[in-house]
Amino acid sequence: MNLNKLFGRLPIRRKLGIAFAALALGPVALVAAMATQVIVAHLYQTAQRTLEHDLETVRSQTERALRQAEQDVTYLSEAALGAFLRTPGAAAAGGPARLAAVFLAHDSVLFQTKVIALDGTVLATVRADGAQAPPDSREAPEGILYALHAASLPPGQHLLLPVELRPPVPGSSPLPAVAILVPVWDAAGKALGSVVGEAYASVLFGGLEQGSPQLRGVTGLVSPEGLFLYHSERKRHWGSLLAPHADVALQDDFLPAEAADIVSGRTKTTPVSEDRIVSFQPLQLGSSAIGPLTVYRVVPTTAFYAPVRRFLGWAGVAGGAVFLVVLGLAATAARQFTQPIYRLREAVARLARGEAEGSLAIETNDELEDLAADFAAMAHSLSQYRHQLEQLVTERTRALRQTHAELADILANSADAIIGLDSERRVRVWNRGAEQLFGYAQPEVLGRELDTFLLPRGPAAERELAFIHRELARHGAVVNHQTKRLAKDGRLIPVSLTLTSLQDETGRLLGSSAILRDTSAQARLEEQMRRSERIAAVSVMAAGLAHEINNPLAIIANRVECMEREVVQRCPGCFLDGDLAVLREHTARLSALTRDLLRLARDDDSGPAPVFLAEMARRVAGLLEHTLAARGLQLDVEVGEGIPPLAGSERALETVCMNLLLNAADATPAGGSVGLTMRAGPSGDAVELEVWDTGPGVPPELRRRIFEPFFTTKGATKGTGLGLAVCRNVVERHHGEIWVEDRPEGGSRFIVSLPLRAEEFSWRQPAYS
């Protein structure tokens, strides 16, 4: 049998200490357990005998007091007061009453005696002071009660009744008492009446109050029906003997079976619940008409077992002291025996940490000393070999750190999104380029499956994913696959995907690495090139049309003007005046169209010049103020402080500002407002021009098309569709941006952002006529 398996993972020093302590404490603990069992049983029996002895003392005192009171009343009924019933004339002389008063004066228990006729009439009431009730109070209700009880008693039987007496002093509390009823018979056995002695309950049951010095508990005296004649807690101060029924029933303190056992007339000590022990004994009153009274005492188990607990406490203290002494001795012996083993273990730990070997200083004159010498020799050899390995590892580690630093720098600073995946396609590497491209921070995506948040939903995406899996299984990589992936904000970003599988030497899949390059700039460049080609074609066509149309329009406009003067002279108010006005209006519209076409098509190679945007904004607002007022519109101008000059074309930027204000005025009904705001950009390296209105706004589906040439929402008679196209062309030549958005208050606003760094411009200024 391997005794080491009896313990868990414990140091050998503790195992030896436990073994020494077990060998020393085992016999002592066995003897102590047997002695404790015997002593506890003796203490329990002693406590039980003490409880029964206290109860026997209480029972004998109470029984003696009741019997003495019963004998005194019987004596008075035979020797003195019975004469009131047998010879009423002789009793009237007062001799029996004086005899009874003298007897009561020497009796400390009886308060008074009464003579009751068969009809309940109180013939006499005698007290210790010789006083008798006045004649008008002899018909007392208690007399009828006593007469009824006396009528039910056979010859030779007496009756005990708890009563409350009227106090001798008016206004005082009633006196609790016990009435002892003794019937009076004549020689022929005929009932004549009864003599009732009313005894002080406090004196009669004084033994119940004081006869329990050793075990504190509850003492009670009950009738055979379970009604209390005394209770040490509820009637201790004798406030009332006849309490309400809920307070005097034995069943209120015990279960029905327990209450029946107590009034059964037996003597017994038994537990009645988990925390109480009761002992009860009957009181035998031979001449009483009621069954035997029962006196009981209930003691809490805490008091009953107090001697046992005290003994166990001291026994525990003594046992603990012995245990600590033996344990200390065992620990000291175990330390002496195991100290060489721990020294050897510490030497092994030092060798494992690479520390220099030292002397073990183990002198036990046994096998442990030999083992220490062998270990010292082995440690010396291992130390030399370890030094050689450390040099080699240092060189290799330096090379690996340099390589790792280079790769980490490439991974961290790459503009491309580099993503490392495990075999389940869960993200384990997410570089800074991926954070900037897709908007997810690294903690948000680590451990998540890549396709759950980057891959768009739909059949096309599923077919693409199946294609990528096939290519990976076939070639191990997918290179420069043009696709789109979802950003955090829901945008679809065009990317170039390169995906490579990572496998170990056995071909088992370890994971994969993905490089995604943003191709949005390339797509925008291609779109801009296509738009530039379209604008170039339109410009060529526009220049040709403008030159071809401009000369005929000038001749037509001249002829219309001449005809208007002729009509005014020859036919004032003639209908031709209105027709010529229509011709003049449409001629002016065609002239405006040719000017817009020339602005869109013609370039000039002159360089940029400083443009003071704040002055330009105020000047344009002043030019259009009266025009907007004539339309019933309010113009609000807000120009920020400290706006720096911008390198560009002042005429071109004036055209942008004027076109945006006129478009806003066209979109705003009479009574509305149009605003012009000039401010520095949020980052401080740009200037923002904002034109807003209170019109109906621009629908979202038209916001991309309104900057295209010849697209207009004003109808064929009001616009050419070139104003916003010219604005975008000018803004893009200044390397800026223009966009439209809704205002929270209603309407729309056009925002132009122009950069301030002129050294980055590749300038070509458009020429305007």
Image (cartoon, grey):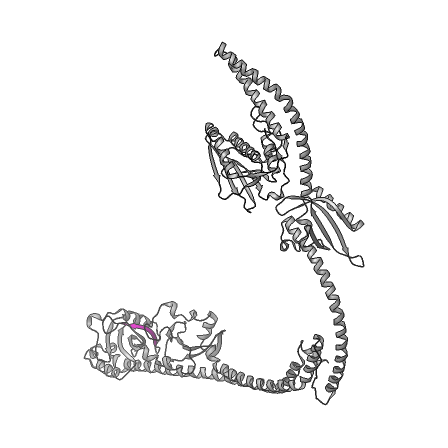
* Residue 94, picture quadrant: bottom left
Q: Position of residue 218 (x, y in %)?
A: 41, 76
Q: Nearer the viewer, residue 12 or 164?
A: 12
Residue located farthest toward the left when viewing the structure as drawn: 93
Relative placement, left or right, of 706 versus 427 is: left
Q: Is residue 159 magenta?
A: yes
* Residue 371, picture quadrant: bottom right
Q: Residue at x 67, y 26 (%)?
A: 541
Quadrant for the N terminus in the image:
bottom right
* Residue 249, picture quadrant: bottom left
The magenta region covers: 158-170
Relative placement, left or right, of 11 versus 55 is: right
Relative placement, left or right, of 132 versus 726 is: left
Relative placement, left or right, of 579 versus 493 is: left
Let me know if residue 292 appears in the view. no
Q: Is residue 167 magenta?
A: yes
Q: Residue at x 59, y 26 (%)?
A: 595
Q: Nearer the viewer, residue 428 or 523?
A: 523
Residue located farthest toward the top when viewing the structure as drawn: 570
Let me know if residue 239 appears in the view. yes
Q: Position of residue 229 (x, y in %)?
A: 37, 74
Q: Count of labels shown?
A: 0
Q: Position of residue 737 (x, y in %)?
A: 59, 39
Quadrant for the C terminus in the image:
top right
